[in-house]
Image (cartoon, rainbow, N blue to C red):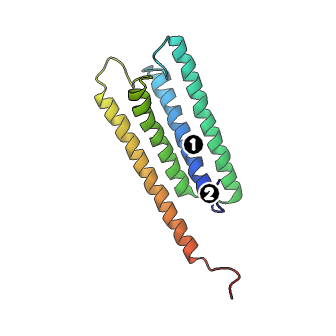
Amino acid sequence: MSGPTGSGQNLWSGVLLGVGFAAFVDEVVFHQILHWHHFYDRSTPAAGLVSDGIFHAFSWFATVAALFLFADLRRAGRLDWTRWAGGILLGAGLFQLYDGTVQHKLLGLHQIRYDVDLLGYDLIWNVLALLLIATGAVLVLRARRVAARRVSVQPEVGRA
């Protein structure tokens, strides 16, 4: 998945955990606690509940996959906390931006809420997504620079 430093695995583990966590929070808060919408609202309430269950399973599959990658990184001593945290923020932000633009607006699977002016909700939802993405990208780039500096100062082995 990546070289000996595990940089790609660190990033993917974080992204999957971010996606899983954001999907889990969306499902629990907006679907179950607030009852604002279902994953798929263009059919019956029963279909909405089934779609929520499938969505919830997706969030757990992403989370479990992320944790397996994380455990492998820890076991191998290749965990890069900065890159991993950046991946979490990137994953959460990308999920939220996808949800707010593709699912809400392009496909119309559901809205954040119904029977209210959506502009404020949409702005908060998508601006928060962009902030998560930007912060995650900064952390990933910072980790990349640190790793590049580490490689450039390592002496070459076997040269006389």
User: Which residue is identified by label 2?
Assistant: 79
Q: Identify the residue shown where x is 60% and y is 38%.
A: 62
Q: Secondary structure at mark 1?
A: helix
In this view, the residue farthest toward the bottom is 160
Residue 154 pos. (x, y %):
60, 76
What crowding class fits label 1: few (fewer than 14 Cα within 10 Å), some (14-19), or many (20 or more)? many
Q: What's the mark number on residue 16? A: 1
Q: Earlier in the sequence, mark 2 or mark 1?
A: 1
Q: Where, quadrant-wise, is the C terminus in this rendering? A: bottom right
| Residue 106, above or below 144 | above
| Residue 139, above or below 33 | below
Q: Amino acid at mark 2?
A: Leu
Q: Amino acid at mark 1?
A: Leu
Q: Identify the residue shown where x is 60% and y is 47%.
A: 13
Residue 15 pos. (x, y %):
54, 45
Residue 117 pos. (x, y %):
28, 23
